[in-house]
Image (spheres, helix red, strand yellow):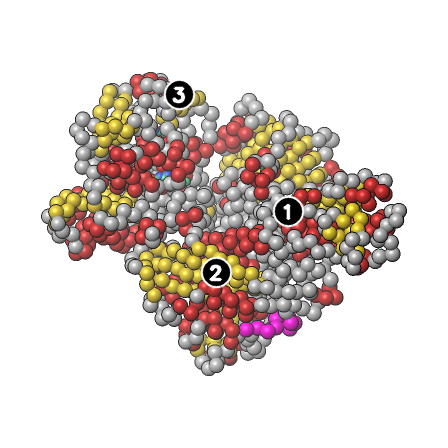
Amino acid sequence: MNPFTYSSVTAVEDAVRDNASHEGAAYIGGGTNLLDLMKENVARPTHLVGLNKLPLTAIEPTPEGGLRLGALATNADTAWNEEVKRRYPLLNQAILAGASPQLRNMATNGGNLMQRTRCYYFYDTATPCNKREPGSGCSAIGGFNRIHAILGTSEQCIATHPSDMCVALAALAATVRVSGPSGERTIPFEDFHRLPGNTPERDNNLEPGELITGLDLPAKGFEKNFSYLKLRDRNSYAFALVSVAAALELDGNTITDARLALGGVAHKPWRDQEAENLLKGQPATPETFARAAAKVVEGAQGYGSNNFKIELARRAIVRALKQAAEGSQHASDVFLNSNP
Amino acid sequence: MSTTNYIGKPTSRVDGPAKVTGAATYAAEFQVPNMAYGWVVSSSIAKGRITKVHADEVLAIPGVLQVFSHENVPSLAWFDRNYKDDVAPGGSPFRPLHEDKIQFNQQPIALVVAETLELARYASAVLRIDYEEEKHETDIEAKRDEGFEPGTGKSGWMPPPPPRGNPDKAWAEAEHRIEHEYVHGAQHHNPMELYGATVEWRGDKKLTVYDKTQGVVNVQNYLTKIFGLSKDDCRVINQYMGGGFGSGLRPQYSVFLAVLASLELKRSVRVTLTRQQMFSFGHRPHTLQYVKLGTNPDGTLAALQHHALHETSQFEEYTENVVNWSGMLYQCENVKLGYQLAKLDVFTPQDMRAPGAATGSFALEVAMDEMAVAAGLDPIDFRIRNYAEQDQNAGKPFSSKRLRDCYHQGAAKFGWDQRNPEPRSMRKGNRLVGYGMAGGVWDATQKKAAAKATLTADGKLLVSSATADIGTGTYTIMTQIAAETLGLPLEAVTFKLGDTDMPEAPVQGGSWTAASVGTAVKNVCEALGEKLLKLAQKMEGSPLKGASLDEVEFVNGQIRLRQDPANAVVLRDVLQASGETKLETDSSAAPNMLKQANHSMHSHNAVFVEVEVDEEFGTVHVTRVLNAVAAGRILNPKTARSQVLGSIVWGISMALMEETVMDHQFGRYMNHNYSEYHIPVQADIHDMEVLFVEEEDDIVNPLGVKGVGEVGLLGVAAAITNAVYHATGKRVRELPIYLDKLL
Ligand SMILES: Cc1cc2nc3c(=O)[nH]c(=O)nc-3n(C[C@H](O)[C@H](O)[C@H](O)COP(=O)(O)OP(=O)(O)OC[C@H]3O[C@@H](n4cnc5c(N)ncnc54)[C@H](O)[C@@H]3O)c2cc1C
Ligand code: SF4
């Protein structure tokens, strides 16, 4: 960890200004990811702009009938917010499937979007990694890649985005609100994170110095038929090997609207609109679900230790859609919830 | 000699309040004046040479005091024997900073010392090291054909016994046969507390060393031999430990480096390792095992063969008893056991909870399950048909063995009769349900240990011994033994440990502390009792005059006549009448060879497991575990139960999660943190039950205890593997059982 300076800001403009005035500055929210990376010498900011006093902790209705989640609201406060629980239970479940209560109490919504991959090599400065040091090579390809991506990979990087919350946000088609040196803008959630391509060092499309101020959820919350299914190596406090956010709107047994996004399989939360289209207008049957699942994994590629994810993802999609259709199973944890 | 009953009663930890309130101070928490901080720099390659340490660059940073490396390390003891600690295996122990040679990845190659921890950490991050890399080999698969039989090994290790009968022929002619390979990767102990040492410089080469260790005496011996210190000038203290599991049996390089820096800088120094560095030393070795079993038509074992090959470093021959148990657990006339090592460019493996037996019992007990299936027998019935009435390895009877009761009582309590033997026949919702069982055997060992007891005029007893409490409950059971022996209330007794100024005790390991230190504590209290009786008899009008030790008992703070309890003397009064402010005794205890020599002494267990498996996802949930343990007398059912519960969790971990994954491109463990090296969390643990089968044994030691720190782990991973087979029909032979192995 390198020496750094720290300031705490109380207004968004000050945050952006303070950040711009320090070469190599970084924002810090809960610090649950950034501090680890600093201790590992992976992140080496010269200056930290502390965000926790910004007036961005509110969770409030939007004029469009949706809900705005402040960037500095904690993951815990967001998950347990009454409106989130009532209108966006998929988001509640996804957040609660992630990390641990202690981490969720510290982690902020902005930080959750910005958390970096858990690729072992990215974390270990003794090994080459294109994301950490562009051009040095990707150790995971040909290495130990059990937790790595099967969709949207490149020859430069096969890392995944590790968030659970973001998978639900992708499914719900949230909008990211940002403020930066050149003013404010909004970014549709699907365009926020990037695929690695030839620039794996860039996780997302935020411009340098831009600050996330909030997340807007559209009015539609799929509160009746949804499922967040997370498969992992232990029942809590582990990142997803594969996770699925499934949300359906049903008219009788006919699917009138559908959302399908996956975690743990790509460099970004993987929403598949083509698969969603295969669901829409169809009966909610295992066959329909299987078709959608097959579509999602159509172009999937394994890298050795993660080959199993392709089949696992296919099965998880079918199960999650089934659970969503039944409206009975809102499992953040496969085990605990089906064994009341 | 007494009738109060603390022994055998569930008693809460006497050290519990100190631990949960933060009053307990751990090695790296001691505050001493004028401290400097050391940060260890670890190599980023597995093999090669350091060509340059660019120390000058970081020494230029204000506040950086020194960079220690092979380039400037002072000359220290020359011979290997000086670096050999009490539990070192054969070979040449690793000497930190000794030379430019790199022998394993994450090798400590420099220590940066600075005025603050943050500065030391920063300086170590920017310290440039030049290497000349050489090709490494870290994959045991590449060394399958290069296994060799170890030489002397470490203390407690025994080469496998020679073959008996005609194992090859018997196997070839057996009615039913199985042969399979069983594998698990490297596992690291990963106690919560990081290794660290605070070395207090008391002037003139006098040191007090607060070190995280399972044996202060071992660390003191090690340090004094290497640094040429006298024992008086090198006091080693460790009163509390945030977990050890074997990782603290040998002195860690953190204490070596802290002492080195302290002596060179003539100032107090602290060195703490990082979580990543906790993966840079001993571990349970990656082991390949091959088992062949064959049965006769009556379901008895016709042949048993068990061979193991595991990794060791290039410089030491780490040994553990992996296969010997197989010649002892079941009756069989045709047995062949083999044990080999393979040298890799890794650090020397190290004892990890039930070393060898956890590994061996996994392979043997899964193989036994496979054999039972092949022979069409119930796995418990199969084991009982092959019950060993004596230890065939040693040709001796067991001092006691209630394993049969473990099978019977355990099976009854677990509800084994509810099991449909057909795999995939039991379901709960969309889950497959499976029952599995397994068991194991572990040594009941007593070592020489000493203790001291002091009774003060206020009636308080202080007992001490330089042993350790790595979380096992040592403080508590020693307090119970002392209170019981001298008839004092628990609150009047204090037990202290972990200080080389105290009477010598062995490292805490091998489940021998209760037997070894417990007997010493009993002895020293009895000796003190004898002194007290003599003094009491000198008192004016003493009602105890003429009474022999056998005729009195120590109860309720009094010495009284057994036959006539009204005739009593209060202990406090004895001391007062004698005019002394305190009464002190030293004593030690050693195994009674006469009694023990003709017996084989072991603890046993049988584990019963229920799993639920989601067939589509391959996720395994261990919903129920019952562990039936026969381990002699249980001194404290509460702390003993905790030990076995911990073992069950450990076994679930071993079966389903734990593996330190080596990337052979780099010869480096890659999941070296708590986020990616998985151990169970609360959500993974469900019903656990511990059943202690009563077992009396007056041969093992005067207390009749066998120790419970390790036996509970045996067979847990095997029982889970067997239950998974029963649930799914899939036999996994390589741990951990990740979900993808069942897809
Ligand atoms: C052991 C462990 C297990 C975990 N398990 C899971 C899991 O299972 N599922 C899961 O989803 N997550 C998991 N997490 C990750 C956790 O969710 C993230 O660490 C957390 O959400 C990050 O939020 P933070 O506020 O602490 O971010 P910080 O650490 O403060 O910051 C992270 C990054 O975001 C940037 N940043 C922060 N706020 C803003 C902002 N408003 N605008 C722009 N940039 C910003 C920072 O500069 C930094 O680069 C785990 C973390 C740990 C340590
Ligand atoms: S997968 Fe990406 S993050 Fe991991 S080593 Fe390769 S480039 Fe680095």
Pointer 2 or 1: first along the chain: 1
At a point 50% along the width and 72% down the height, the residue shown is B383
The stretch in magenta equals B387-397
**Mark closer to the observer (2, 3):** 2
Give, as a three-letter code, the residue at label 2: Leu
At a point 67% along the width and 68% down the height, the residue shown is B599
Please, is residue B658 above or below residue A114 in the view? below
* Secondary structure mostly taken by the magenta-highlighted segment of the chain: loop
Give, as a three-letter code, the residue at label 1: Tyr
Mark 1 belongs to which subunit? B
Q: Which mark is residue B497?
A: none
Q: Which residue is mark 3?
A: A8
Residues B465 and B675: in front is B465
Q: Quadrant of residue A160?
A: top left
Under circle 3, the secondary element is strand
Give, as a three-letter code, the residue at label 3: Ser
Under circle 2, the secondary element is strand
Residues A68 and B441: in front is A68
Residues B37 and B559: in front is B559
Dot 2: within a 10 Å radius of its alpha carbon, few (fewer than 14), some, or many (20 or more) residues? Answer: many
Q: Which residue is mark 1?
A: B475
Q: Which mark is residue B626?
A: 2
Could you say where residue A272 lies in the image, as x and y percent from the top left?
20, 44
